[in-house]
Structure formats: structure tokens, C-alpha cells
Amino acid sequence: MRIVHSIVELRQQLANAEHPAFVPTMGNLHAGHIALITQAKPLGDCTVASIFVNRLQFLPHEDFDSYPRTWDSDCEKLQAAGCDVLFAPREHDLYPEPQTFKVHTDPALADLLEGHFRPGFFTGVSTVVMKLFMAVFAGKAQGTAVFGKKDYQQLMVIRQMVRQFALPIEIASGETRRSADGLALSSRNGYLSEAERAEALHLSLTLRELGRDALAAANAIEAHLPALEAKAMETLSRRGWQPDYLTVRRRSDLQLPHAGDALVVLGAAKIGATRLIDNLEV
């Protein structure tokens, strides 16, 4: 595996690649990230991963400085997975001057759910992903990028961005990887105490129950949804969580569902000081 830090080095390394397959990450890699690398390998002629903790997507009170950085372990995992190139830019490599030009996202998709509770989050995500795409895919006739479904809304925002900018990039999605007890793998799980880790499973359990209730009420989902969501919020709150949202949306655009729509259940909640997200297609 070749490790490069500058965009110039990366483009030199990819000069002979016709169809790179790319997995962007913020590091602190777990089995979910490695599954995306494995998924990416047959999708291109050079497998590229990036590690970059993107300041633009963190609010002032969030954990940018304390976000776990596990460089040696990350490199070992990527090499073992068969990654060909690791792009690990320093902040001045990716942002050599203040990033005043940004990708402003569609409010109808990006200002609800995560975007409502983390204002500006998807502008920061979309801007860094666009820069990474330009670094990896510039001059290429085609490419593939792989994103996990765990960040469901993010996946939809990136797909919309690629479509509207007519980028020659296929966006592939990887299923959420879970621990044996069902907890969605996340870099932030490392923040959890032993007791919080045991409790954390109840986010996915509550979402599963909400999904079952939504399917049972599918023919009249609009009438029943507010009560179903309130019940789920109360379930977690009683257990000591601080839920931001537990909701049922239609998969196509994350708007409120109507009878007959394909559904996804999404949630975000804090246990202690750690905010976790999860989702389930139902």
C-alpha cells in the first residue's frame, strides 16, 4: 500500500488507473470500514482510501479535537484488506487557504434530521467529499465511491450531489455492519463506558420496534406516525437517553411517508456524552 499526503502525489500515484474505487473515511477504522474496502476492490482497477478528520463538518461544541485518531492501526487494517493507495492529507494539503467556496446542499434533504440538529453539517460533508472526489477522480472517465448505509442521510446527500453536478462517479452503498448483539459499528462507540455500551443496544432495539409498529400501521401511516414516534422517544428517554429524533421516513427522499411508500426508520440519541445514530430499512 502506498501512502501519500498531497493531491499532487495522489494524482501521480493514480496516473495509470482508469477506474479508481474510493472509500473516504475519517480514520479510527473498524470492521464496517474494512467491509467497504472489500466491497470496493472488485469495482475498480485501484482501491483508494482516505483518512481525513474534516473540521468543516464539526460544530464548535463537537468533538473535532478529541475525535479518535488511530493511525498505525488504521494503516495495518487497510493494508491487510488489500487497499492500494491511502490518501492521508494534512489540513493544509486539503485546505491550503480558507475554504470560502462550499457546496451548499438542498435544504429539502439536508436541513432535516441530522441537518436540523447539526446545522451546516452536510455543507461541510459535501464540500470535503467534492474536494476528495476532485483529488481522486480528476481526469478519469469514470470511478466508483463506496459509502456505508449507516450514515443514511449522508449517502442520499452525496448521491444527489453527484447526480446534480453530473460527476462521472457511481456511488455504491455498503450495508451497516453490526456487532454480535446488534449494535451498529461506529467510531464513536469507543467513547462509551462499559455500562453505556451495554445500554447502547437499545437504540437499535427501539428503532426495530418503531419499524414493526410502522409496518403494522402502513395503510394509515400518516395518521398513526406521530403517536408511534412519540412512543419510541419516550421509550428511550425513560432509559436515560437524550433522543434528538426517532422517525419513520420514506426511503426515496426522507420526507414523511404515505401509504405504500418504502420506509426507513432513523434515529439519533445521546447516551451519556456520546451521540449515536442508526437506521433500519423496513
Image: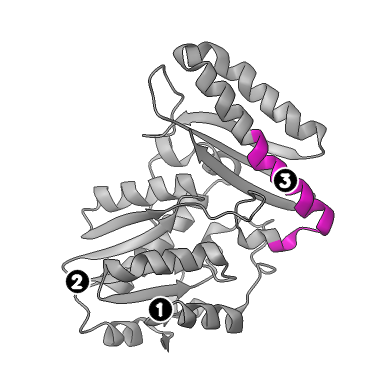
Which residue is disc 2 drawn over? 140
Q: Distance between the residues labelled 3 and 1?
A: 34 Å
Q: Which of 74 and 57 is in front in this view?
A: 74
Earlier sequence position, callout 3 versus callout 1? 1
What SS does tag 1 mark? loop
Q: Which SS class for mark 3?
A: strand
Q: Which residue is drawn at 63% across and 48% down?
A: 182
Q: What element carries label 2?
A: loop
| Residue 162 at least partly seen | yes
Image location of residue 29, percent across then percent down: 56, 70
Q: Can residue 273 be seen in this view?
A: no
- The residue beneath circle 3 is 270
Would you say residue 196 sits in the magenta stretch?
yes
* Alpha carbon separation for disc pair 2 and 3: 42 Å
Disc 1 or disc 2, which is closer to the eye? Answer: 1
Q: Of the residues shown, which amino acid type is indicated by label 2?
A: Lys
